[in-house]
Image (cartoon, grey):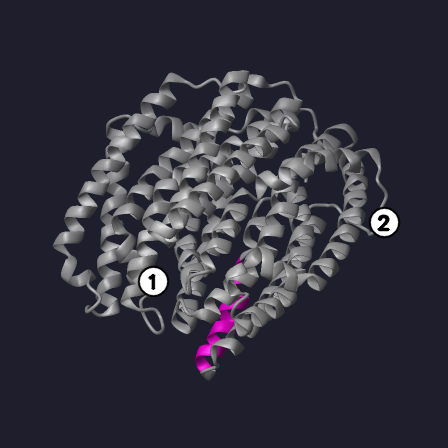
Amino acid sequence: MSLVKKFMTVGGATLGSRIFGFARETLMAAALGTGPVADVFYAAFRFPNLFRRLFAEGAFNAAFVPLFAKEIEANGLDGAKRFSEEVFGVLFSVLMILTIGMQLAMPLLVEWIIAPGFADDPEKFDLTVRLAIVMFPYLMCMSLTAMLSGMLNSLHHFFAAAIAPVFLNVLMIGALGWALWTGADPAATAWALSWSVLGAGLLQMAVVYLGVRHAGIRIGFKRPRFTPNVKRLLVLAVPAAVTGGITQINQLIGQAIASTKEGAISALQYADRIYQLPLGVVGIAVAVVLLPELARALKGGHMKEAGTLQNRSIEFVLFLTLPAAAAIWVLSDEVIRVLYERGAFSEQNTAVVASILAIYGIGLPGFVLIKALQPGYYAREDTKTPMRFTMVSVALNTGLAITLFPIFEESGIAIAEASAGWINAILLFSVLLWRGHLAVERALITRTLRLIIASAIMAGLLVYLSQRWAAWLSPQSPLFDQLLALGGLIAIAMPVYFAIAFLIGGADIGMIRRNLKRKAKSTEDQAASGGEGDQQ
């Protein structure tokens, strides 16, 4: 399977998850709006989500995948199975202790970290603590899911791991549907959502476990032992955990600051959900696919192939995120109005959330570039350098958020996050270049400039059309008319952008066609040498 096809496989599954996510947030807006219970739920859910990123996705996509790939190369599936069981025993034990400890300490965590602004409201504070206790075991489920997903990705089985997050949205939609159907009060709705999160974690873990069994590996539980392989994993995973959770860390900082204003946390969350669509479809797809491909190329000594993979990934990211950023900037009001403005979500809520979304749009290419650049370090078993850049990013985000929130309120937090994302991406790119791990092709530079031009032309067209269709897009228009107009804008903008991009040389149709047909060199070499990872 070619690199682009792998991006499309993971991106397509992630797109399905994000579409369900939109449906979930639309129902959430109708049920809770930006009221106090919405703030409470999102605050409680953010904490297990943060630890999921810190101890699961970031750590295992950065540290576990290269070591697992090395075991496959050296000792075949039997060696990879032994390594997986060693890691599983340690991971399960550590997570069990962490989960119990965090649940016992939850009142202190809410007061000092999660939502300090809730401390003066006993009702909000108590509900946040109780909901967080119910949802925190989700971390344990998702951490084990991340390990199993890393195994699947290394074995070139991408779909099961990518489709698993859909189940979280499906169960939460079910809970919201029940609440709206029965007219449940906000507190009961939040309780139903919390239990649906826990149930989704168990279901996602079951799905990827079945995927691993289908790929030919059966994992048994073994007494936790710190073997040399496990110690090496921990050395790589600790800095990678911090790096992988950078977005969540910055958002947690923003949430703590925003908790002093009612409605601010949920407003940030609603905007976050929109920009997570291109971030997830493009960024996660690139990160998931690129890391094992780069690791295999480097382990095989194919340095030129590794450089080509890195350049093509950056080009792919810019090709899709630059127009997405431009469209989000121009259409932020229209998108928020169509998706959320109903029920408890008012016209004033739309104005606030749209201003946040527009700023996130500016940061989008930077956020996705981080996903494309970090594998260049992780594949070389360097997790400390990205961690240092992460700490710079966190410091910048914290300073800007504290400074800007009193002036711009929620938008100030969005500015801080977007700025921190771009600084992180620039640092990652510059050091890869300086070390000689990335040779920027002239074609990449010229195509980037042309893609910016194509995106600007598309944005100008969207401004013109949105003004002409203002009556259809106004809050007073029927929802169907708003949907039709917004869909029409997108349907016109996409072909215009692609046509201009290809016409002025921002993208090469021949290159894309070759990438769709081409097998990654590392994969071909594995097949030629009888590599067991590709035989599954």
Q: Nearer the viewer, residue 131 or 467?
A: 131
**Residue 289 at x, y = what percent?**
55, 37
Q: Which residues are magenta?
A: 166-181
Name the residue that disc number 1 marks: 339
The reply, left or right, for residue 488 in relation to residue 222 is left
The residue positioned 41% from the left and 45% from the top of the image is 403
In the picture shown, does residue 307 fall above or below 35? above
Q: Amino acid at mark 2?
A: Lys
Going from N to C along the chain, the mark reached first, 1 or 2, is 2
Q: Are marks 1 and 2 in contact (CB under 8 Å)?
A: no
Q: Callout 2: 10 Å neighbours few (<14), some, many (20+)?
A: few
Location of the N terminus (image quadrant): top right
Q: Is 244 included in the stretch rendered in magenta?
A: no
In the picture shown, does residue 96 fall above or below 303? below
Q: Main secondary structure of the magenta part?
A: helix
Task: Provide the secondary structure element on which disc 2 rests.
Answer: loop
Q: Is 173 included in the stretch rendered in magenta?
A: yes
> Residue 381 sits in which quadrant?
top right
**Residue 288 at x, y = what percent?**
56, 40
Question: Residue 222 — which label?
Answer: 2
Residue 202 in sight here: no
**Residue 57 at x, y = what percent?**
61, 45
In three-dimensional space, the C-alpha distance between marks 1 and 2, rounded to whole angstroms, equals 48 Å
